[in-house]
Amino acid sequence: MNFVLSSLSEGLLWSIMAIGVYLTFRILDIADMTAEGAFPLGAAVVVSQIQAGANPWLATLLALLAGMVAGLVSGMLHTKMKIPALLTGLYSINIKIMGSVPNLSLGDSATVFKQLASLGLTNEGAVFSLSLVCLLLVWSCVRLGIISR
């Protein structure tokens, strides 16, 4: 049972990236690597902020904002400077954000999962709960979700 839950939680995490890749490659018909680069960027921002002692929820919000800025910069480089979309997504600033250290350990630092574990949730339960909340938020914002209300 533990194997199934861990497989589902990891699959849910990777499915978000797969949707981003699908949108850029198939629907928009652009070979843009920003979707793949935004996930490590978010991880670098979260880890560096948690290592600096920031609140994990604030660090997650900052990671979201960093991903948005990465998409904005990539879009501006592509549309305003006429740089091909594939090349605009290949810049890497993750190691610079992490303080020139390519691998940081969270160790005993406070994380979102540790805060949720204090509520009695396992890591798998926390991932599932957060994924469900995110899906419900997205569903409530899309046209079909608004119609179904």
Image (tube, grey):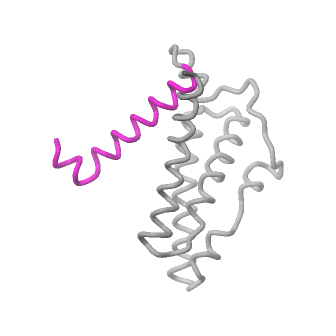
User: Relative to 38, does residue 2 appear above or below in the rendering?
Assistant: above
Question: Which one is in front, 36 or 79?
Answer: 36
Determine the residue positioned at 60% across, 67% down: 33
Magenta range is 122-149
Q: Quadrant of residue 148?
A: top left
Question: Which one is in front, 57 or 8?
Answer: 8
Q: From this viewpoint, which residue is outermost toward the bottom?
A: 82
Determine the residue positioned at 62% across, 69% down: 89
Secondary structure predominantly adopted by residues drawn in magenta: helix
Image location (x, y in percent) of residue 107: 76, 27
Determine the residue positioned at 71% across, 60% down: 93
User: Relative to 57, does residue 143 appear above or below in the rendering?
Assistant: below
Question: Which one is in front, 139 or 81?
Answer: 139
Image location (x, y in percent) of residue 73: 56, 69
Q: From the image, which quarter does the N terminus lie in?
A: top right
Q: Is-magenta flag for residue 98?
A: no
